[in-house]
């Protein structure tokens, strides 16, 4: 059986409370008594209980991380940044996912909060209303990723990322530029859509709602979007996609229709997944600083836990990456 504080107290001839204080290096315990108890604890093989210590401190040294979808490769480097940030600060990580189910998301966050994790980070929240509603009070502080309207959030500037892609396409001579979204209501798609619309307007290009097709953030959504776009009386010469997975679906569907990328149609994605540089053709895209987002999210959460001054939303600049999937419009 594990050695307990009571066992050490019996051997040392002192009370369990004296042992507890000595093991925590309490200044009120006599130096010789403290040394004797600490030596006994080592000799007897005593292992401190992290659970008991955390209960006393009212902290668990644990961060709850809630991810929209673990199978989404977008989260690979984000998770690395989150874990590195937590471990370097001496925290453990509890991880769960909700598969884009808002009800499941709320259940996980509530469960983590009830377990008294020190703080919670949610990536890909379906909505922010549950986190800002005065009726919903959480025990643990919460940071959201890529939800910049939430007061405690770390995000990439996706509006600016979309603007840079559309500007690039326009400078290549394209005027019929389509956008394959995630979906009509999902909050992740709104900054990109706004950037797309604003840049067309900036260059005096009229919006055509027929060029906006709803996808699902997956390869399948990109595949399904292509027949509709090619079926237009004036098809697009360039297609901007919600993410790299959608772009890969679009490129594959274009090939099946006999179109060559970028000779016939230019295609750009968003995220810069690892596969984007190695796909054929290599994918023009926007690199979200996902690792840095993860580290910043942990730092922000720990500032909330420690009540260290004002915390405001943080927005990081993305990086535009031009590769082989976009080219000047064919004349």
Image: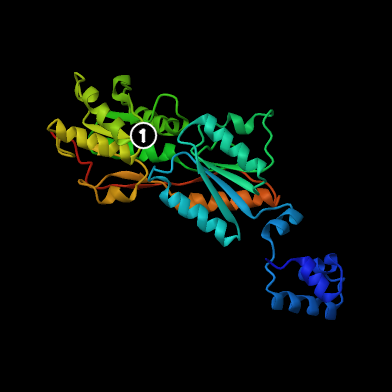
- Give the quarter of the figure containing the C terminus: top left
Residue extending farthest top: 233
At 56% across and 59% down in the image, what residue appears?
87
> Picture quarter containing residue 22?
bottom right
At 47% across and 51% down in the image, what residue appears?
79
Residue wearing tag 1: 217
* Location of residue 33 in the rendering, given as x and y in whole percent from the top left corner: 84, 78
Of 326 and 4, the residue lying toward us: 4
Of 152 and 136, the residue lying toward us: 136
Q: Residues within 10 Å of mark 1 (few under 14, many from 20)?
A: many
* Location of residue 89 in the rendering, given as x and y in whole percent from the top left corner: 60, 60
- Give the quarter of the figure containing the N terminus: bottom right
Give left or right: position of 277 versus 51: left
* Location of residue 122 in the rendering, given as x and y in whole percent from the top left corner: 54, 41
> Picture quarter containing residue 197?
top left
Of 222 and 111, the residue lying toward us: 111
Q: Relative to residue 18, is residue 327 depicted above or below?
A: above
* Location of residue 184 in the rendering, given as x and y in whole percent from the top left corner: 41, 24
Judged from the image, the secondary structure of the residue bearing numbered disc 1 is loop
């Amino acid at each position: 059986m594990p050695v307990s504080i009571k066992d050490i107290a019996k051997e040392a001839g002192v009370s369990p409370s004296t042992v507890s204080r000595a093991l925590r290096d309490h200044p009120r315990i006599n130096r010789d008594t403290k040394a004797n108890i600490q030596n006994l604890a080592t000799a007897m093989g005593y292992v401190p209980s992290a659970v008991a210590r955390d209960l006393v401190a009212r902290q668990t040294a644990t961060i709850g991380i809630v991810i929209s979808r673990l199978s989404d490769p977008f989260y690979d480097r984000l998770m690395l940044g989150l874990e590195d940030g937590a471990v370097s600060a001496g925290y453990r990580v509890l991880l769960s996912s909700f598969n884009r189910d808002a009800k499941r998301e709320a259940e996980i966050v509530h469960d983590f909060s009830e377990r008294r994790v020190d703080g919670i980070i949610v990536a890909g929240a379906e909505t922010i209303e549950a986190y800002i509603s005065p009726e919903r009070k959480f025990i643990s502080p919460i940071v959201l990723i890529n939800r910049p309207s939430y007061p405690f959030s770390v995000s990439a500037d996706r509006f600016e990322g979309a603007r840079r892609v559309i500007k690039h396409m326009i400078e290549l001579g394209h005027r019929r530029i389509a956008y394959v979204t995630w979906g009509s209501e999902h909050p992740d798609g709104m900054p990109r859509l706004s950037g797309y619309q604003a840049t067309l307007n900036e260059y005096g290009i009229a919006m055509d709602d027929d060029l906006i097709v709803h996808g699902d953030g997956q390869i399948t959504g990109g595949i399904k979007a292509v027949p509709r776009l090619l079926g237009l009386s004036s098809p697009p010469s360039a297609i901007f996609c919600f993410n790299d997975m959608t772009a890969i679906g679009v490129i594959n569907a274009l090939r099946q229709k006999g179109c060559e990328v970028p000779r016939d149609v230019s295609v750009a994605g968003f995220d810069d997944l690892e596969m984007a540089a190695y796909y054929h053709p290599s994918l023009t895209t926007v690199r979200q600083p996902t690792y840095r987002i993860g580290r910043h999210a942990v730092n922000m959460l720990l500032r909330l836990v420690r009540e260290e001054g004002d915390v405001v939303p943080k927005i990081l600049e993305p990086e535009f990456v031009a590769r082989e999937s976009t080219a000047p419009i064919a004349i």
